[in-house]
Image (tube, rainbow, N blue to C red):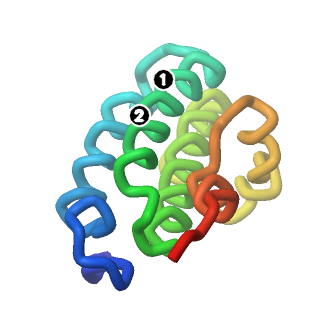
Amino acid sequence: MMWRWESTTQSTKDTKTGFEEVQGCKDALRHKTRRSNGHSLAMIVVAVNVSLMGWFAYFKHGHPWTFVRLDRWLRRRLRSILRKGLHKRGISRGHDHYRWPNQYFWDHGLISLEVAHRALPQSS
């Protein structure tokens, strides 16, 4: 899916989260969320949170949908790792959301970019 250019009304560089910037974040997270990395979910969440906090600090004034989409994508990858632990193949198939709901990841310490963005004071 190709992402459209997303920005706020401001024209500074740090408020725009374009396709290349999101892909750069995804590439960094892909490396940390490989299905065959052999680490526990707790260790993966700690490593992922470091990248997410840094990326969010730079792009915190971006369009809200950027954070929602990235959160969804990341949870899908984490569910895929958990599926592998059950000796199942592929990415989530619908029932995985019920098996491991979003709250499951939050309980394990994963930060949500969407929640962080909503909690950010929106100044004009």
State the residue at coordinates (63%, 50%).
112
Give the class, few, some or many, for how many residues have Cα within 10 Å of label 1's Cα (few <14, many ≥20). Answer: some
Label 2: state its secondary structure.
Answer: helix
Give the class, few, some or many, for how many residues have Cα within 10 Å of label 2's Cα (few <14, many ≥20). Answer: some
Mark 1 residue type:
Ala
Image position of 106 (left or right of 82): right
Residue 104's tag is: none
Residue identified by numbered label 2: 51
x and y percent of residue 95 in the render? 74, 60
Residue identified by numbered label 1: 47
Find the distance from the CA under tag 2 to the CA under tag 1.
7 Å
x and y percent of residue 50 in the render? 47, 28
Hey, which quadrant is residue 109 in on the image? top right
Q: Is residue 64 above or below residue 58?
A: below
Hey, which quadrant is residue 42 in on the image? top right
Image position of 89 (left or right of 4): right
Q: Nearer the viewer, residue 41 or 89?
A: 41
Q: Is residue 83 above or below residue 98?
A: above
Q: Nearer the viewer, residue 6 or 58?
A: 58
State the residue at coordinates (45%, 48%).
56
x and y percent of residue 30 in the render? 34, 39
x and y percent of residue 86 in the render? 67, 32
Q: Is residue 2 above or below residue 28?
A: below
Mark 2 residue type:
Ser
Please report contact status of discs 2 and 1: CB closer than 8 Å, yes or no: yes
Hey, which quadrant is residue 97 in on the image? bottom right
